[in-house]
Image (cartoon, grey):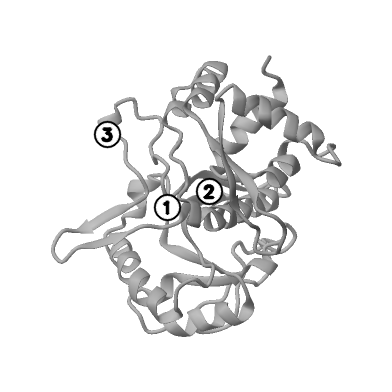
Amino acid sequence: MVTERDIAVLIALDQYYVLSRQLLQQLCFPSDNDGRATRRRLQFLVDARLINRQKLLFAHPNGGSPASVYFPAVLGGELLAKHFDSSRYLATNTLAPIPHHIPHWLAVSETHIAFDSAVAREEEVEISGWVNEWDVVNKDEQSPDKRYRLYSLLRENPRLVCAPDAAFLLSSKGHHKVFYLEQDRATSGARQVAESKTKGYAAMADLDWQLRHFPMSNVKPFNVLLIAPSPKRRDLLRQAIKGKPGAHLWKFACVQDLRPDTLLHAPIFHPCDGEPVPLVRRTT
């Protein structure tokens, strides 16, 4: 029998895509101190084919034995669609993550959770429509032929694409601004990141492409938030992107600063030039 906590697990995977058992326990089973109840319900959902599991493919960068990760399943999306009477869940991404990209997807999920935790403390700030790279952007569109993803082909010849790791709309007091996410794990050189990423975002800004993803946006330009694993890596990327097309769009922070009490209002986001700024300025 599917329980309310099982529904919470399905919602969490729909929202974040790839989650470890520890993250699911934190989100859905906060009182399960030893993880036993979490493991039992996850096994039930896997056996019922309501969620998918990748076994023994991921070792956390902070150490520990390889562990399983979980991601959405078609039957789980169908159950949510029926439960909430909403067809949007039928468009949930159920593609298996590429094994060597699992640490990246978990890092994106942890950043997403950090943003949700920060916004939960606020009365006048909200995040609308967080979209991961493989998600369908316009899930409410009934025709599959009219649905599209975050990946954007901006120009055929010479070919130019932009593939953000995620995007979201941040709203505060009637202002709606788009942010694109680049989750860095220091697996590519800083110069390579700068060469491969900046032209696409610059072209998107010129075309107001963010309005395709979030028509409600009324603040220009959008920003690209690059989250680095350390302050040193953050500053290397700032220097590499400085002077590149659209460099003014980029803001850089490191994972350690993404705390609920600092993420929105503390000056933790560094431009290529100048002093760090907050994501949302407090009003007096």
- Mark 3 nearby-residue class (10 Å; few <14, some 14–19, many ≥20): few
What residue does disc 3 label?
A: 146
For the point 57% across and 17% down, the residue is: 83
Q: Is disc 2 in contact with disc 3, using a CB cutoff of under 8 Å? A: no
Disc 3/disc 1 C-alpha distance (Å): 24 Å
Compared across the picture, whether 193 is left or right of 73 comes to left
Looking at the image, is mark 2 or mark 3 earlier in the sequence? 3
Out of 46 and 29, give the one closest to the viewer.
46
Residue type pointed to by label 3: Lys
Residue where numbered disc 1 is placed: 218
In contact (CB < 8 Å): disc 1 and disc 2: yes
Residue type, numbered disc 1 = Asn
Q: Does residue 173 lie above or below 237 as drawn? A: above
Quarter of the C terminus within the rendering: bottom right
Q: Secondary structure at mark 2?
A: loop
Expressed as whole percent of the image width and height from the top left, the position of residue 191 reads 40, 81
In the picture provided, is 92 more to the left or to the right than 61?
left
